[in-house]
């Protein structure tokens, strides 16, 4: 068994009818907008990682509200966390992202430069119907069925 796994968080930070997004600078999402997040460090709880990642990436302070879902892969997990804005003005970290901003949720769902996974996360936030297992068929096609998403 490999020890190359990841424990990560994705953070939906809401401020009234807006959410916090960053424009990614590397990898498959380079140039696209997505929710902030990242890997947990050793002995760090998901909510601690979420607060740290949001602050590091955007200079915004946010507090944990709820877990919306978890995406489980063969080598790790990605927890989707809902957070409330506390204070701060969004600002790029100058490294992982080139831009940090608040955007209206409906606009984010319509834009082509917002990642598909971010749209899945935003739809989960807006959903009034909670289901035990949610499997996004379009995302599964892209990722070759390597995960299950629980919401």
Image (cartoon, helix red, strand yellow):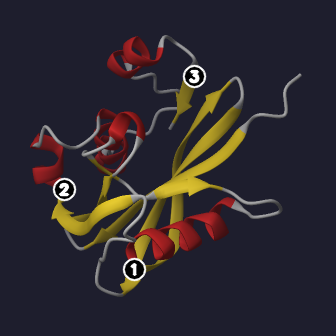
- Point out which mark residue 60 bears: 1
Label 1 Cα crowd, 10 Å radius (few <14 / some 14-19 / many 20+): many
- State left or right for residue 90 relative to residue 51: left
- Point out which mark residue 52 bears: none
Question: Dot 3 lies on which element?
Answer: strand
Label 3 Cα crowd, 10 Å radius (few <14 / some 14-19 / many 20+): some
Look at the image and tell me in which quarter the N terminus lies: top right
Q: Name the residue tied to disc 2.
A: 105
Mark 2 or mark 3, which has the lower sequence index? 2
Give the spatial CA distance, label 2 vs label 3: 26 Å
- Which of the pair 135/143 is nearer the observer? 143
Give the spatial CA distance, label 3 vs label 1: 30 Å
Whether label 1 touches label 2, CB < 8 Å: no
- Point out which mark residue 147 bears: 3
Whether label 2 touches label 3, CB < 8 Å: no
Task: Give the residue drawn at x 29%, y 62%.
Answer: 98
Residue 27 position by quadrant: top left
Task: Give the residue drawn at x 37%, y 54%.
Answer: 35
């Amino acid at each position: 068994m490999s020890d190359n796994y990841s424990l990560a968080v994705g953070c939906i930070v809401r401020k009234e009818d807006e959410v916090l997004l960053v424009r990614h600078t590397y990898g498959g999402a380079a140039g696209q907008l997505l929710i902030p997040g990242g890997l947990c460090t050793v002995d760090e709880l998901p909510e601690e990682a979420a607060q740290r990642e949001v602050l590091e990436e955007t200079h915004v302070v946010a507090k944990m509200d709820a877990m919306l879902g978890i995406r489980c892969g063969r080598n790790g997990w990605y927890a989707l966390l809902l957070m409330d804005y506390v204070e701060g003005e969004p600002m790029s970290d100058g490294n992982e992202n080139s831009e940090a901003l608040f955007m209206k949720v409906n606009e984010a769902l319509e834009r082509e430069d917002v990642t598909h996974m971010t749209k899945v996360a935003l739809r989960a936030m807006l959903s009034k119907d909670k289901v035990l297992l949610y499997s996004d068929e379009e995302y599964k096609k892209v990722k070759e069925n390597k995960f299950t998403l629980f919401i």
